[in-house]
Amino acid sequence: MQTEDLRDVRTEEFELNMGPQHPSTHGVLRMILKMDGEKVLHCDPIIGYLHRSIEKMAESRTYTQFIPVTDRLDYCTSMTSNYVYVMAVEALGDISPPPRAEYIRVIMSELNRIASHLLWYGTFCLEIGATTPFLYAFRDREKVLDLFEMTCGARLLYNYLRVGGVSRDLPPNFLKEMIDFLDYWEPIIPEYEDLLDQNPIFYNRAQQVGVLTPAHANRFAVSGPSLRASGVSYDVRRADPYSVYKDLKFEVPLGKNGDVFDRYRVRMEEMRQSAAILRQCAELIPSGKFIDLHNWRFTLPAGEVYKHIESPRGDIGCYLVSNGGDKPWRCKFRAPSFVHIQLFRELIKDVLIPDIMAIAASFDIVLPETDR
């Protein structure tokens, strides 16, 4: 075809649905893409396919009965979902867990952070075409789940935290098993990084892709590793310390460019910091009661409270309202995945189709906490 003939060639825009059943999407997220060939002109994320009325269910259950439901809020990190809810109940009822229970909660939260980041690492790599990292990650994640199973008998939905403490004490050999795991696992974290850090294909898929500036991140209320990858040093464990985090030493990893690569690097460093926190907890945990026993069907004084913690995905909060009864009058969760999905309209624009899942996966969204 002659060059002058190409002047008459026109491309036609079209719409493409990615999800909600697409095998590459996280859960049941639907993205309506306006395309010009391989280029994305506009992305409209659609949620709601997994809505279960969790917040409405709280109104018909006692404060204790609702704890197992919070497991389903984010099935990848059930411990932190339990945690933020029981913290809100305790704040409204002026209940103080024993010191040992506080350390146990932090131990479970950090183990769950490691398990969640390993799950993210494996599935993130799988979605951009790498199979081996997935096998490495799930091999070691199973060892963390063994520790959870030893403690509460479950490997996914734990129902372990209670108002006033935890449901049962740590098994006698738990701390030894945990340290043995860390001794095995910490030295091999570089194996995960070696698979990606020096890989030119991964560089092309991750560097300068999905760049999120600090100003943009703050405007959208981004939190967690996705915010810190943009260079913003905000971690609830430091900014608004809860439990025993104020007594523990750890760093807050930061990125520089806010791209897919930095979001990956921040999570890898966070796993090392979680290991450091766990070692400190193993040394500092006191003996004593693991729960402040009380009548499980209790009432709370009328009032409202908001509590938030640092989940593996970001700042998760619980707004709880009591009218003086034994059930919440209103229970509202602030979920980081819900916030981060809104970014896709901005970041999944003027990119090619292969970049879509690299960007979406780098935010580690989980649909259950989005569709509450």
Image (cartoon, rainbow, N blue to C red):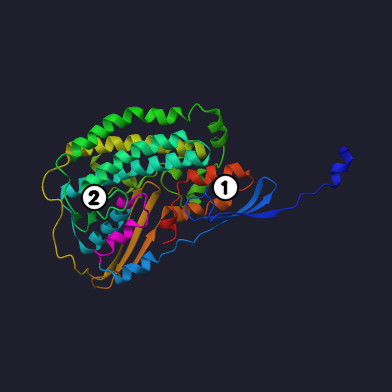
- Quickly name the residue at label 1: 347
Under mark 2, the amino acid is Gly
Q: Is residue 88 above or below residue 290?
A: below
- Residue at 33% x, 36% y is 273
- Quickly name the residue at label 2: 153
On screen, residue 94 versus residue 84, left or right, reads: left
Question: N-terminal of the two: label 1 or label 2?
Answer: 2
Q: Is residue 172 above or below residue 325?
A: above
Residue 46 visible in this rendered orientation of the protein: yes
Q: Is residue 192 above or below residue 306?
A: above
Front residue (pair 366, 101): 366
Q: Specify the quadrant that holds the C terminus.
A: bottom left
Crowding at dot 1, Cα within 10 Å, few <14 / some 14-19 / many 20+, comes out as some
Under mark 1, the amino acid is Leu
Front residue (pair 162, 159): 159
Is residue 65 located in the magenta-colored stretch of the structure? yes
On screen, residue 93 versus residue 21, left or right, reads: left
Question: Mark 1 and mark 2: span between their CA atoms?
Answer: 41 Å
- Residue 178: percent from left, percent from top: 23, 37
- Residue 230: percent from left, percent from top: 48, 41
What span is colored magenta in the figure? 63-80
Front residue (pair 367, 344): 367
Figure label count: 2
- Residue 126: percent from left, percent from top: 49, 40
Residue 143, picture quadrant: top left
| Element carrying mark 2 | loop
